[in-house]
Amino acid sequence: MPETQVLGSLTHGAPDESPADEVFDRIVRLVRRNLGVPAATFVLLGQEDDVQYLPGAVGLPAETQRTRRYVLEHPVTGLIAETRTAVVISDADAEPRVSGRGLVKDLGARSLAGYPVEDSRGQVVGALWALDSTPRTWSEDDLATLSDLAAACTSELRLRSERERARRAEQVAFRAHQRAQFLLGLSERFAGVTTIEEVEETIAQVVGSGMGARWCSLALVDADRRHLRYITVGHQEPGFPDEMRSARLDAPRPDTAVVRDRTTLFYRDHAEMIEVFPAMAGIGLLSAGARSFLPIIADDDVIGVVVCVWEDTRDHDAGTAALETTVSRYVAMALERVALLEARRRVATTLQESLLTDPPAVAHLDIATTYSPAARTDQVGGDWYDTVVRDENTAVLMIGDVAGHDVSAAAQMGQLRSMLRSMAWSHDDSPAELLTRLDRANAELGPHAMATAVVVRLDHDVEPVGNTGPEGTPERGYTLTWSDAGHPQPLVLRRDGSVERLDARPDMLLGIAPDATRRDHVARLLPGETLLLYTDGLVERRGVSITERTADLEVALSEALGEATASLPRALVRRLVGRAQRDDVAVLAARARVQAPSGPPSEEGPATAERRVADDLSDLGPARRWVDDVLESCDVDAEQRRTAMLLSSEILTNALEHGAAPIVVTVVVDDERLRVAVRDGCTRPPVLRAPEPQDLSGRGVQFLERLGSRWGVEQHLPGESVGRHGDLGEGKTVWFEIDRSARPLTGAVPVVHRRSPTTSSVPLVERVLPWTRDEARRRRT
């Protein structure tokens, strides 16, 4: 038989397929014309001993001519293959060697001549026959012609064999090239992986393009090595139940068996897997195709499993096995790298966040901060902010940015921040003098860092001044003194919604020229106005100018007029940065609180304040914030202010939604109690309701009942004058009081500690690197 199948489906096709071949048909026609015989054929021996194929045939019976295939017990061609010599018979009846064989018996040939045809290995695989129905003496020219044409058949077979061999070699080379390209791409894909989500995404791409799998899953072993947990979200096979996403390592499942036995498992279809693990039957998996379970080994321990699922039945060939081994190695290295990056990031962010503490409580200032680290896993920067309270009327606000995005930058930031914090507390200097001291200390003591910074000093007016208060009255604001060391310019949100950029020319950066001259600049911050300090990560974006981005920040800040200060920094980061973050961002917002016009409670009487409220819900937030400001200026503690804010929100919302204009809120505070009242133009009193758990409203009166020391409703007659707003007509006032000694909530204000950001929701460090390499070696020994 030929070493390579050169005739397509000749010897493997269905019985009704004709193996006729135009080249060999042409050769047998030459035999018939040149030898003058009625029939000629090229016979190719099949794989079975009694099967013959006729790729070239002429003059044979119609059925044989059509099918080109017949079955003979003792083919004469087999005699040629055995002897490797030609068979030339003048009269078959007189030749016992062939009298009972196929060509003579079935086709009725009386005289026949056949020459062997060889393949590329020199083996006889068939013969070229000339057939005559009468006895005949074959001449030397006849036999020479037949021999030459048989040699032509041999040459054609060998040529086809070489072509097939070349084609297959080309396919092998192409597949080898594809595999080399795939492995190179595999290395490049995993080289840039920095998060567990990117590991999962890369695995999905690799098993899909390189192995043809439809779905994949990634599971990691817990640090205690008792459970295997799936972390895959977007590429897992549909139908995988949630209750199976975590399993004990001793569970009878193929994925846990891989962890226990440290070996790859492959099943050509779902049924084969069920035979080995009956517990996997009936769990609703979508595919009935092949599955493989690959161990991920790091430091000689299985740290996870990659599951690949195909849609169809598939055999586990050597190529797939080699790819699986390579993929599992790359996944192991990628997971170790991600875990090390996460550990490094945790160290840096822990250091950074230990320094970026929550701002202190500052009298008459509402301060909020946020810090958002860069989205890239290996980046942690030198952004910082700080607030130092010098006395009850002076506070120093600081923000800065050390050049760099690594642990070194975070360490330098910590040193600069600590030095500046100490100087601001111990030296009653201006911002320019503080920055000069800091720059000299940075140069002479270290850390020799290059950084930008802004220092702002807020001095509260001792007595009301100017004519900026209500109806042109004096009020206590702040003198704002600042100095800028190459940092983005501060912004001030004024009470009318405009935004002012404190655009004095910045001085030299820190770390360049310690003796450079620095200047102070002065502005005013009035009650209700907000100072915004930020780092360049908030306004920098690739391809967009700083001027344009700063203008966008001014618009966003203007539109935030009336929003709570606590939510302002994060809201600005979400709006301007979002998911496109490439740099660290620190934001500090400080709002000067509005104080009671009468001042705090004294022997002369209680503190009082009154505010007209707009006729729609857009003024609800500012009105609530005004109530909180007045209470804070009267030294009401944080817990009672929180209670008062909740109750004020309820009665304000009720007036805005169900009452009528005009609406006025009044606050009265003395040493015994605080009182908040809201008057509107509707006489219908609030109703105590019993809402269902799913109802979104109807609990306002219940809050008044449970949290207020007292509450009530006063009806007003037409023409009755109440407060400084004069005659408001008929209506009602809903009020509540809280005794200054009461603790209606919990008795304490809970502190919410921020969690350090991680690269993903999975504690990868504890899973991939649960112990050191030395410990791993010790465990193995």
Image: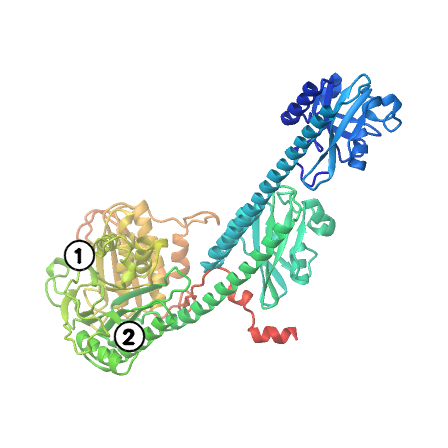
391 in relation to 271, above or below: below
What residue lies at 27% left-to-right and 58% top-to-bottom? 540
Looking at the picture, how far across and down is residue 223, in whole percent?
A: 58, 67
Colour convention: rainbow
| Left or right of residue 434, residue 96 in this image | right
Viewer-proximal residue among 252 and 130? 130
Q: Amino acid at mark 2?
A: Ala
Q: Amino acid at mark 1?
A: Arg
140 in relation to 236, above or below: above
| Left or right of residue 583, residue 313 in this image | right
- Residue under circle 1? 724
Q: Quadrant of residue 35?
A: top right
Q: Residue furthest front?
A: 140
| Left or right of residue 375, residue 25 in this image | right
- Residue under circle 2? 449
Q: Secondary structure at mark 1?
A: loop
Viewer-proximal residue among 425 and 463? 425
- The count of marks equals 2
